Amino acid sequence: MRSKAVTGMTALEIAQEIHAHAVVCYKFEAVKNIPGVKGIYESAANGIHIEDGGDTAVRKRAYSTIWYLF
């Protein structure tokens, strides 16, 4: 675990990423073996990696969507 501050991400973006990982792990566990869902589930279940600058633009949009839907 790092002890320094993350740069290039807002508090909201960090919260959205953490929230999205939790939602995918808990809400999608029942369908985790369906092709196309398995990879997404495994990626989310593999832990949260908050890094400077945040994730890819596509993942950030997914995190934001999950934030507002769940």
Image: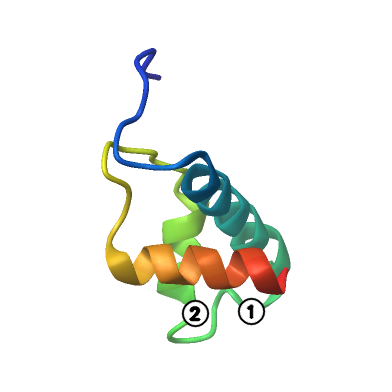
Q: Of residues 1 and 68, which is closer to you in this image?
A: 68
Instruction: Give the label on residue 37, or none.
Output: 2
Q: Of residues 44 and 35, which is closer to you in this image?
A: 44
Report if residue 28 is visible in the image: no
The location of residue 67, given as percent across then percent down, is: 63, 63
- For label 1, the residue is 31
The location of residue 62, given as percent across then percent down, is: 47, 71
Q: Residues within 10 Å of mark 2 (few under 14, many from 20)?
A: some
Disc 1 residue type (three-letter): Val
Q: Residue at coordinates 38% horizontally, 66% vertically from top-left?
A: 59
Query: Does 9 appear above or below 28?
Result: above
Disc 2 residue type (three-letter): Val
Question: Quarter of the image holding residue 10?
Answer: top left
Report if residue 65 is visible in the image: yes
Q: Residue at coordinates 47% horizontally, 44% vertically from top-left?
A: 47
Determine whether, in the image, residue 31 is placed left or right of residue 47.
Answer: right
Query: Does 6 appear above or below 31?
Result: above
Q: Residue at coordinates 40% horizontally, 19% vertically from top-left?
A: 1
